[in-house]
Amino acid sequence: MTGLLYGKVRRKSKSKKSIPSEKEGADLSDKASEDRWRQIGEAEARVAYDMTLRNELSGVSPPVRRFEVAWRRWIGCRHVMTTANGSSALYAAFFGLGIGPGDEVICPAYTWINSIGPALLLGARPIFCESDPESLLIDPEDVRRRITPRTQAIVAVHLWGNVCDLEPLLEIGREFGLPVVEDCSHAHGAMYKGRMVGTLGSVGCWSLQSSKPTSAGEGGVLATDDTVLFERACLVSQNSGFMGGAAVAGLQPWGLGMKLRAHPLGIGIASVQLERLPELNRRRRSYVEAVESGLAEIRGLRSVKVYPGAVRAGFHGFPLLHTPQECKGIPTEKVIAELNAAGVAAVPCGYPLLHLLPLFANGFDLFTRGRGPLSGDYQGYLEGALPRTENMHRHLVFLPVLSDPLPGAADTLVQKIAEVMHRLAKRH
């Protein structure tokens, strides 16, 4: 069946690209053989062992509360809650904001699907916008163009550890009375003009999935200064450990009967990871900046734009922009193939553009009988709907992220890239 499943047929997308799994997307930051960093060590194993012996296997255990306090103090906000994963944190955040049926939420098409999927499950319709082709991040001016009377939130995704241009986004939010939700899943410890990301918008959310800089195996974090938002978020996710206050006092102690809590063992592991995060960020930043510095003299490949006042962190991926017009029109696929042949583990982008996924391109009768946000008057998307983002996406090249590289690894990488680009230029 084409178009809407169990509903009216919609236009089919022209895109036939294969769709990777979440693990395939995360593989962009897997460590190469030159990396001496190990994600999990004896300290994490010891914490899990000790918690198991103490039977701290469910519920709101002391290690969970200590981690939440540590996270709150670290980023500098009033309320923090752990959840089962980053998607659960975003679901609770959208619910906390009152997002529901008939609402629209603006989100970049270039992000992982979980940045917007939770809003969809609350009945809200995603409105996809362009990304800045230099930074790969949400374009504030395109956000402004897509605001309608139904718009209820803007999702700012700090993709690959880079930080969104938050000042104009927050100004748009103030102008139209719209909350900005910060998805910080790739950017643990990143900052914008002296403040931690996740604390500038109405609410910030992080993933603690196994590939993330601070890992719980699976887990998530929600942070906000808005007490009413926080209490509503608890209402939908913290059943039997409900932390709600005056705004929802009549529903104590069971909330809505929903439980999206984090597993205590995972949070125990994440508490060790959080202590190691500054060193991890320091090492990754040093490596990435060393490679980027070397690439400045190489035509055809350039680093992504970093906005003034932004400090990258997390570095969940290491994207570069290929500019064919600067290297005799050599296709990006050819560049990636030649880099791999030379021993550089380069890959294309592992994230599909969301507006071209069948779910959003064609629509889907989510709640059956035409009641979902992607049915009824939903128009879907065709290839070409977001031309700047689509063109950018075609020319992305990802390098491996190294957290503790062998001496000289950055210089060796740059040298190999320079040799490949020079050789390709001579052939064409």
Image (cartoon, rainbow, N blue to C red):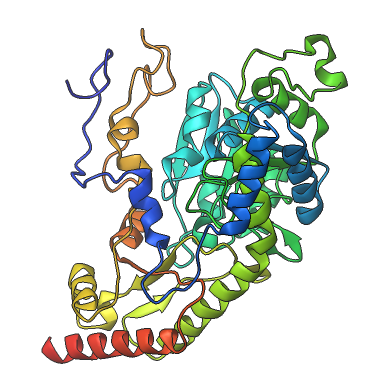
User: Residue lying farthest front?
Assistant: 53
Q: In the image, residue 56 lies at what x, y percent?
A: 68, 32
| Residue 92 in view (yes/no) | yes
Residue 368 placement, left or right of 246: left
Name the residue rendered at 50%, 69% in the picture: 37
Residue 37 placement, left or right of 187: left
Picture quarter with the C terminus: bottom left
Q: In the image, residue 237 lies at what x, y percent?
A: 65, 24
User: Residue lying farthest left?
Assistant: 427
Name the residue rendered at 76%, 54% in the picture: 75
Q: Nearer the viewer, residue 269 or 120?
A: 269
User: Residue lying farthest top?
Assistant: 369
Q: Nearer the viewer, residue 422 or 384?
A: 422
Q: Is 125 drawn above or below residue 315 in the view shown?
A: above
Q: Is 130 drawn above or below residue 202 in the view shown?
A: below
Picture quarter with the N terminus: top left
Q: Quadrant of residue 147?
A: top right
Residue 63 placement, left or right of 134: right
Residue 16 placement, left or right of 224: left
Q: Is 297 drawn above or below residue 249 in the view shown?
A: below
Q: Quadrant of residue 3?
A: top left
Q: Is 257 drawn above or below residue 355 in the view shown?
A: above
Q: Quadrant of residue 285?
A: bottom right
| Residue 179 in view (yes/no) | no
Q: Nearer the viewer, residue 64 or 196?
A: 64
